[in-house]
Amino acid sequence: MLRTLTKDTVKKIGKKVLLKGWIASIRDHGKVVFVDLRDRSGVVQCVGQNLNKVSVESVVEILGVVVKRPEKLINKNIQTGAIEVQIEKMDVISPAKELPIPIDTDGYEIDEIARNKYRYLDLRRQRMTNNIKLRSIIANFMRQWFLKRDFVEIETPILTKTTPEGARDFLVPSRLQPGKFYALPQSPQQYKQLLMVAGFERYFQLARCFRDEDPRKDRAYGEFTQLDIEMSFVTQNDILVLIEKMFTDLIQKIFPEKHITQKPWPRIPHKEAIEKYGSDKPDLRKNKNDKDELAFAWIIDFPLFTEQSADDFYYGSGSAKFAPSHHMFTAPHPDDIGLLDTDPQKVRGLQHDLVLNGFEVGGGSIRIHDAKIQQKIFDLIGFSEEQKKQFSHMLEAFTYGVPPHGGIAPGLDRFIMAVLGEPSVREVMAYPTSASGQTAVMDAPSEATADQIKELRIKVC
Ligand code: ASP
């Protein structure tokens, strides 16, 4: 007999069905026992007599007949609330021990370490299941939206060379070339620019990025996903208009109950944002208690450079004063090119940040496509000749005909967190790392064996 999903039971009144799933709850009234059966499509109430003992969360299969419930027993809160299944036979496929964490609450009250250790159980909770399913729907919407507009989805390498975005790299030792290391990409920044040199013109990727920086609530430790985009022959305005349209369409389709505070989205120069709101990611919601309000804004006209601080370990050899506000491939404002020689701090960059309800949910820029200007930026951030060599492939690529180009990378985790009003990106990731950097369930980082270390010819001190 074919399996019926719980949501389809309502179409089978009077019929015999075979259901498979987990026991969400049991109410034992002596002779009569009520069992709520959960599968990927929802829940249905089943009722039986003289059933064998079975524990909550066990996986079972139930053979039964779908019957209408009497009017006064209809449960309007669930899709299948007008019917129930009269159990003829219930078999346990796989029994469940008592769960180490409750899963019938929203879960915020449970210690993060326990939630992460038992993430496969934590994900059974309705809120988490919904968040992860929504994430899939959002990612799919983005993918289709860009594919329809002539973008090409292209994967870029994970084992690669450092792409500085201002964070520390994760290094992977090479076995074939002992003493050398790959870096995990902080973003596909250089690869996507090189795809423009290759002539694709419109690229996107739901890209995994890796940064060894301290976790914050809007940033998981280690890795995150961004909707990475790059386009040729565009102005900054083209990028802003396109992204604004994509998110507006997305909200209308997937979250019709939500409203956007201001359309078109305000474009605020960085200086004004700081003076007026004291922040470059202002929360512009009219009513911060309204969970359905989405205040998008663009922040533009950033200074190209910030003062170099101790955190900017990556740049310069100590003598340089500047670090890039966004990254070192961001183009200076064309009106300010002359200032690069005289007053670099006054130079504005063609950078754009996307802000939603007080969170920076994306950033991007028009890029430098002139090797001479790129050289100049390397000098201003204090790159040594050795450091410059690490980027010689970019400078060389730019000598073979490079289209003017630019892009952006909205963070997928961060956007979903902000839209759903979740307190942390970890609530919208299937397997996040914990605040202390342990991976969910698998508990990495862990020790390597002596043999593994020997083979890599590295020493652990
Ligand atoms: N690579 C940048 C980042 O990850 C985004 C961009 O400039 O397109 O923030």
Image: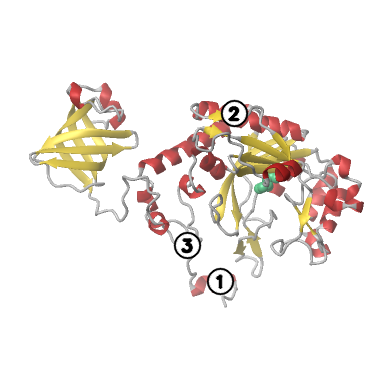
- Determine the CA span between mark 3 and mark 2: 39 Å
Is the residue 166 above or below the residue 136 in the image? Answer: below
User: Local crowd at mark 3 within 10 Å, few (<14), some, or many (≥20)?
Assistant: few
Q: Residue 455, labelled with which disc?
A: 1
Q: Position of residue 280 (x, y in %)?
A: 68, 45
| Disc on the earlier residue, 1 or 3 | 3
The three-letter code of the residue at mark 3 reads: Ala
Residue linked to disc 2: 248
The three-letter code of the residue at mark 2 reads: Thr
Residue linked to disc 3: 444
Q: Secondary structure at mark 2?
A: helix
Q: Position of residue 222 (x, y in %)?
A: 56, 56
Is the residue marked 1 within 8 Å of ligand 1, measured from its CB? no
- Determine the CA span between mark 2 and mark 1: 52 Å
Of 166 and 263, nearer the camera is 263
Of 435 and 388, nearer the camera is 435
Residue 75 lies left or right of residue 281; in this view the side is left
Q: Residue at x 60, y 66 (%)?
A: 175
